[in-house]
Image (spheres, rainbow, N blue to C red):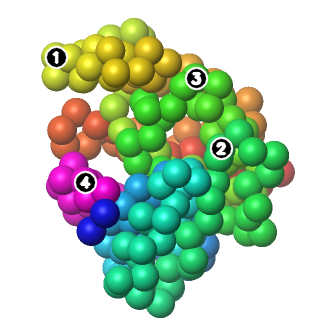
Amino acid sequence: MLNYSPNCERNQQPIFEQLQGLLTDSRHVLEVGSGSGQHALFFARRFPWLSWQPTELMMNHEALKLNLMEEAVENILPPQILDVCQAGWGVDYADAVFTANTLHIMGWPQVECFFAGAGAALEPGGQLIVYGPFRYEGDYTSASNAEFDQWLKQRDPVSGIRDFEAVNALAEAVGLQLSADVTMPANNQLLVWRKSEV
């Protein structure tokens, strides 16, 4: 498998256990930043009633496409190229948007684009589900996350672990209300916002 991620392999089951209760009424999930496609393959097999739409940046799209072709899971749609700051995400319908370990890789302008795009793509009542590390009131949830943040910034100064309060403000600005904040293994969180039905 191209671009295989051991971290992705480790976090699949804990995320799945949370998604079980969240995606019961969903039909179409848009995954932003699908990477190798490991999450798409794992979750789509376990939620056969869902259509799962993987996406990636152009530079990673071919590897994702090849990985998904090898497995050929019926309810995974052909992967799309998606830059979160492109005008419109080219999605006709999504009642859930899922992303894992992407916000700390993006620059802040891309994080802003992500929330604006997710807010526009979701149907009323739809959910935005974000997995990854966050800070709370400026504090890290663990010493290892503080070290990880330093490593991220040394590698790319525009990246870094995001403040929960800042991303929650972005979500609220596009009509999304926090419905869950679940502490996950390995010092990660699963944040869930729901789009207003009004």
Residue 52 is one of the magenta-drawn residues: no
Q: Which one is earlier in the sequence, the residue at label 4 or at label 3?
A: 4
Q: Is residue 125 above or below residue 173?
A: below
| Mark 1 vs mark 3, CA separation in Å | 23 Å
The residue that label 1 is drawn on is 143
* Other-residue count near label 4 (Cα within 10 Å), few / some / many at <14 / 14–19 / ≥20: few
Residue 22 image offset from top left, x and y in percent: 46, 62
Which numbered disc, 1 or 2, marks the residue that appears first in the sequence? 2
The answer to the question of whether label 4 and label 2 lie on touching residues, with beta carbons closer than 8 A, is no
Would residue 11 be counted in the magenta stretch?
A: yes
User: Mark 3: which secondary structure?
Assistant: helix
Residue 135 vertical position relative to residue 13 in the rendered view, above or below: above
Q: Earlier in the sequence, mark 4 or mark 2?
A: 4
Q: Is residue 14 left or right of residue 62?
A: left
Label 1: few (<14), some or many (≥20) within 10 Å?
Answer: few
Q: Which mark is drawn over residue 115?
A: none
Tell which circle, 1 or 4, labels the residue nearer the N-terminal end: 4
Among numbered discs 2 and 3, the one appearing first in the sequence: 2
Query: Mark 4 to mark 3: distance in Å?
Result: 24 Å
Q: Nearer the viewer, mark 1 or mark 4?
A: 4
Q: Earlier in the sequence, mark 1 or mark 3?
A: 3
Q: Nearer the viewer, mark 1 or mark 2?
A: 2
Residue at the disc numbered 4: 5
Residue 108 disc label: 3
Q: Which residues are magenta?
A: 3-19
> Which residue is at 48% across, 71% downward?
65
Q: Amino acid at mark 2?
A: Val
Q: How far, Cα to Cα, is label 4 from label 2?
A: 22 Å
Q: Amino acid at mark 4?
A: Ser
| Majority SS type along the magenta span | helix
Circle 2 is placed at which residue position? 84
